[in-house]
Image (spheres, rainbow, N blue to C red):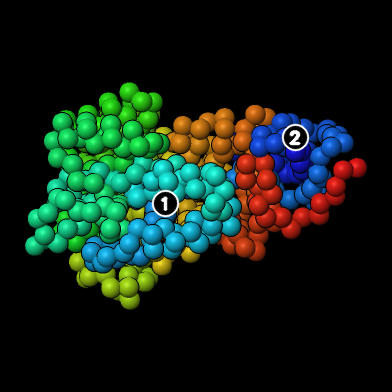
Amino acid sequence: MAATLLKNCRVFDGYGDEAVPGQDILVVDNRIEEVSQSPIRDNAATIVDVGGRTVLPGLIDAHVHVFAISLSASRNETVPLTLMTARAVPRIKAMLDRGFTSVRDVAGGDVGIRDAIAQGWIPGPRLFVGGPGLTQTGGHGDHRRRTDSRYDIDYNANAFVFFSRIVDGPDEMRRVVRDELRKGADHIKIMASGGVGSPSDALENVQFSSEELQVAVREAAAKGKYVCAHTYTSEAIRHAVEAGIRTVEHANFIDSATAALVAERDAFVVPTLVCYEVTAQHGTKLGLTPYVMEKLDGVNKAGIAMLDICRRAGARMGFGTDLMGEMEYAQSYEFTIRGRAERPVDILRSATTVNAQILQQSGQLGEIRPGALADIIVCDGDPLRDITLLSDPAKNLRMIMKDGALYRNELPVSAVA
Ligand SMILES: [Zn+2]
């Protein structure tokens, strides 16, 4: 039994409005055993002197693509799966270095990479995966060239097609959702509208029929899982949420009535604002076409307004980033962007307890309370006053603990008293 005692912590527990000073936290093995205002004594514990710094639950990013090693998914470049995996390794590690102790992959990430992290072969956050995103023919995830009519794409030979699986009709949807769940998916991802990166579909396109979406939701629910959907417009969000989809991703063009529907149905919105801002800066250089850049500009402009619309309607908001390839360095900048329209504490709850709910991990992840898994970070300064501190994790994060183990620590440690 290994124990770590964090002394003199200013604790944001993932729920409260404020961080509470003068707390001790006892971690035994991979769980938080005790959080107390009075000094905890444990003769067997390694003691870390937190020195009154702010202690937060390990951050959660609910929208990443660990295998998105390059922006140009539509280029149909051939990348062997092994090369893709090797290139994903440093990206995955970098997420943990930024204080993200759990991330949800919503297209691409599979059980193999999830288990490689869990078994300790690759340093990285806990990974929740859905396998490929499901797309209709001609939908956001259909990256075939216009001249290519084959369905029999070799998923193992070309990494970029690893991201999506083409599905048409309720029967095929039933079979494919069951198949992804059979392979161990934590959730199912559906492309329910057009997108920015796809070469030939407009953002406004609503994709899949209600019946197809309902079949996916039913099959996932039968296994205790849920469906998340890529959507931009109110029409597409309504279409998805009415079919029972639980998390709507991006949602840049959501209006008040649709945000109210999301709240009423107990669904979640997962904004991913940083990807538009950063991709708009680099896109032309990286070979995006004028058509794609124009779509990008539209969603970028709508982004900040959506935060206010969702907050007013009572729609719960998670925290996501969706950064591809070369843009991935900017993950933590999402905190600064959200800070333009939201209170720091609301952003922190999005990235901890709300995202834990999304992951179906309430009580386990995203909180500093007895019984939760010991994913804990320590930040210099007060991110509840200045959220931008989290956008510079190399400078401001002084300790990162994942699953009870000190992954990174710059604080004074003393062995057993
Ligand atoms: Zn995405």
Dot 1 alpha-carbon crowd within 10 angstroms: few under 14, some 14 to 19, many 20 or more? many
Can I make out residue 290 in this image? yes
Q: Amino acid at mark 2?
A: Met
Can I make out residue 272 in this image? no
Of labels 1 and 2, earlier in sequence is 2
Where residue 193 appears, x then y in whole percent? Answer: 22, 47
Q: Does the residue tagged 1 have its C-beta within 8 Å of any atom of ligand 1?
A: yes
Q: Secondary structure at mark 1?
A: strand
> What residue is shown at x 35% (from left), y 37% (from top)?
183
> What residue is shown at x 20% (from left), y 66% (from top)?
291
Q: Amino acid at mark 1?
A: Val
Q: CA distance from mark 1 to mark 2?
A: 34 Å
Where residue 64 appears, x then y in whole percent? Answer: 41, 51
Q: Which residue is mark 2?
A: 1
> The N terminus lies in which quarter of the figure?
top right
Q: Is 313 positioned to the left or the right of 201 in the image? A: right
- Furthest toward the right, the residue is 417
Where residue 11 appears, x then y in whole percent? Answer: 70, 41
Q: Which residue is mark 1?
A: 64
Q: Nearer the viewer, residue 39 or 27?
A: 27
